[in-house]
Image (spheres, rainbow, N blue to C red):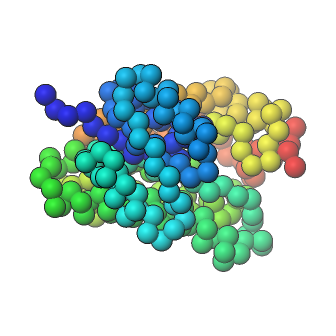
């Protein structure tokens, strides 16, 4: 009987990260829940995973640091003695700017957390596997993207640039890390209130998609488990957004409905 696999979920303490941790646990995985500033929520997520009968190890790490990927993997090995079979790069920086206000500091901050560290986590996993006997393609990396990369508008310039780079990195990294590691993308739409949104704005904006209803967070999380467990998928991106990417808007959806935030 094979050992229970581990999944590493970055930003796993809250929102979609929590849903990802729970979905993997429900599918029989142990969970490495990464967090940075959400300690209380991380403990709550850990308790929820343990209640499902699976292990949950909390790892605190600033993904903005240059050595974050290596430090995070060292912590995984120290805590479990095994490499994660799947890495879900869910954590991200999401701060407002536009092309005229974007600074080098702002762009670099988004790129480090949203692009550089996720790619380095995948590369580091492959390097570790090269030194250990493992079935080719049994391990995978899932980069959580955003429907914005398939449906461009100019709002949230630095964030969008960082996610566009990561989206292009999916196919490139899949080629580079084959056959050791599969690499896929996962593109959700608007799932939770973001940035300056009021609740009224969110309720309206969350229905601006082909199905005219809010995206179910658990559906997105289950899609990640599907990718992790389907050994024939690599170099592709699965869109789980109720068709939001097919509804073109000149501005971010939160600015395209009434009830706007600040």
Residue at image location 56% in from the left, 52% down from the top? 36
Q: Is residue 200 above or below residue 13?
A: above
Residue at image location 87% in from the left, 37% down from the top? 259
Q: Position of residue 194 (x, y in %)?
A: 71, 44
Image quadrant in which you'd find residue 93: bottom right
Image quadrant in which you'd find residue 198: top right
Q: Is residue 32 above or below residue 27?
A: below
Q: Is residue 225 above or below residue 233?
A: above
Front position in the image: 39 or 7: 39
Q: Position of residue 37 (x, y in %)?
A: 61, 51
Front position in the image: 64 or 143: 64
Residue at image location 33% in from the left, 47% down from the top? 79
Residue at image location 71% in from the left, 75% down from the top? 103
Which image quarter holds the N terminus?
top left
Q: Is residue 50 visible?
A: yes
Image quadrant in which you'd find residue 226: top left
> On the picture, is 107 further left or further right than 7?
right
> How many numbered marks are there?
0
């Amino acid at each position: 009987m094979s050992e229970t696999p581990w999944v590493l979920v970055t930003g796993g303490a809250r929102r979609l990260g929590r849903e990802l941790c729970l979905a993997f646990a429900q599918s029989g995985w142990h969970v490495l829940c990464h967090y940075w500033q959400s300690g209380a929520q991380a403990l709550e997520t850990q308790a929820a995973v343990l209640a499902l009968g699976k292990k949950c190890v909390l790892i605190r790490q600033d993904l903005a640091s240059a050595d974050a990927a290596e430090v995070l993997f060292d912590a995984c090995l120290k805590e479990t003695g095994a490499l994660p079979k799947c890495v879900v790069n869910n954590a991200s920086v999401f701060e407002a700017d536009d092309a005229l206000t974007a600074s080098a500091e702002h762009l670099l901050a988004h790129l480090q957390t949203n692009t550089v560290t996720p790619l380095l986590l995948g590369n580091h996993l492959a390097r570790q596997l090269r030194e250990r006997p493992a079935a080719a393609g049994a391990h995978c990396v899932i980069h959580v993207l955003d429907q914005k990369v398939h449906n461009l508008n100019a709002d949230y310039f630095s964030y969008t640039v960082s996610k566009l780079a990561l989206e292009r990195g999916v196919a490139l990294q899949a080629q580079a890390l084959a056959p050791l590691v599969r690499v896929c993308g996962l593109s959700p739409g608007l799932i939770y209130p973001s940035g300056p949104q009021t609740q009224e704005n969110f309720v309206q904006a969350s229905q601006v998609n082909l199905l005219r209803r809010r995206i179910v967070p658990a559906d997105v999380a289950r899609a990640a488990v599907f990718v992790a467990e389907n050994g024939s998928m690599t170099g592709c991106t699965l869109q789980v957004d109720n068709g939001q990417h097919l509804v073109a808007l000149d501005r971010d959806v939160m600015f395209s409905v009434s009830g706007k935030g600040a």
